[in-house]
Image: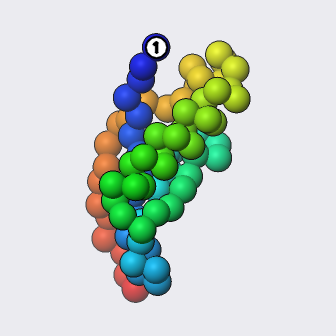
Amino acid sequence: MKRNLTVVIEKDNESGGYVGFAPGIPGAHTCAESIEQLYVNLKEVTELCLEEMNSEQKREIPDFFAISHIEVAV
């Protein structure tokens, strides 16, 4: 079975690389020097985390809803 998941990717200003995680999947986070390698790493770590989850935990993974922006004072 296959499922499309939403992942969050950020640029790491200190290293110049990238960090990413799959919301709702504990442990599904990684980093890489290139965006291409980050996608490979994210897929691998997410699949490993899903293998460890039981059926009920997999059903509780949140479905993607939206990405939004907010304005805050700094």
Is 24 left, or right, of 68 in this rendering?
right
Q: Quadrant of the C terminus?
A: bottom left
Question: 10 or 42: which is nearer to us?
Answer: 42
Question: 34 or 21: which is nearer to us?
Answer: 34
Q: Compared with residue 29, is residue 61 higher up or lower down, i.e. above or below?
A: above
Is 26 left, or right, of 32 in this rendering?
right
Image location of residue 6, percent across then percent down:
39, 40
Image location of residue 7, percent across then percent down:
41, 46
Q: Quadrant of residue 25?
A: top right
Q: Amino acid at mark 1?
A: Met
Is 57 left, or right, of 19 in this rendering?
right
Q: Compared with residue 21, is residue 69 higher up or lower down, i.e. above or below?
A: below
- Could you tell me if residue 24 is visible in this image? no
Figure label count = 1
Q: Residue shown at 63%/36% (left/top)?
A: 49
Q: Compared with residue 1, is residue 62 higher up or lower down, i.e. above or below?
A: below
Q: How is the image coloured?
A: rainbow
Image location of residue 35, percent across then percent down:
34, 59
Q: Residue shown at 47%/46% (left/top)?
A: 42
Q: Residue shown at 39%/78% (left/top)?
A: 16
- Could you classify mark 1 by the number of other residues whose Cα lies within 10 Å: few (under 14), some (14-19), or many (20 or more)? few
- Could you tell me if residue 4 is visible in this image? yes
Q: Does dot 1 land on a helix, a strand or a loop? A: loop
Question: 66 or 7: which is nearer to us?
Answer: 7
Residue at the spot of label 1: 1
Image location of residue 29, percent across then percent down:
56, 52
